[in-house]
Amino acid sequence: MQTVPHAQKQARWRPQRQVIALATLGVFVAIIVGTLYLSQSSQMATLGRELEDLIQTRDRLEQTNEQLRAEIAGLQGMANLQTRAQEMGFRFADRSDIEYLVVQGYNPNREAEIAPREVIVEDIPVYDESLIGWLQQQIDSFQRDADS
């Protein structure tokens, strides 16, 4: 008879143990989910910072490219080219410096002629292969390889 009261005492604690076990399990699940959330959010923040850095680098490079284009345009300006040409010893041509060449048969007012395009017509082979024919080719090829 002592086993019945002992069993009843254990039975009273079972629901409380289950509640404690479930609460502990809930706390562990919450910790795991929180850890995963923090890990994911920190990775996203890191990627966001890297993206901002890359965007700033791209913008800086675009600005440098535009400055270089403006510099090139300034160097290719007519006034700058004339100054550089004079520094190199070039000068403006006078009428006496110009020589004209006469080319026999050249007509500068003629209409442009377009050469006719050659049309190449190729005969397209007729497709007449069937599944049975293809299988026969494969079998013949296999037999030739086996005989070799």
Image (cartoon, grey):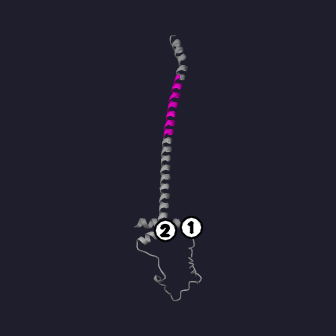
Q: Is residue 146 above or below residue 3?
A: below
Which residue is identified by label 1? 130
Name of the residue lying farthest toward the bottom: 104
In the image, taking residue 111 as reference, residue 95 lies left or right, namely left
Foreground residue, 98 or 50? 98
Most common SS among magenta residues: helix
In whole angstroms, how far apart are the C-alphas of marks 1 and 2? 76 Å
Horizontal and vertical percent for residue 120?
56, 78
User: For the residue marked with disc 1, what is the amino acid?
Assistant: Ser
- Tell me where the magenta segment starts and ends, as one range: 20-42
Horizontal and vertical percent for residue 92?
47, 76
Which residue is identified by label 2? 79
Foreground residue, 78 or 33? 78
Name of the residue lying farthest toward the top: 1
User: For the residue marked with disc 2, what is the amino acid?
Assistant: Ala
Q: Is residue 118 above or below residue 147?
A: below
- Along the polypeptide, which appears first: circle 1 or circle 2? 2
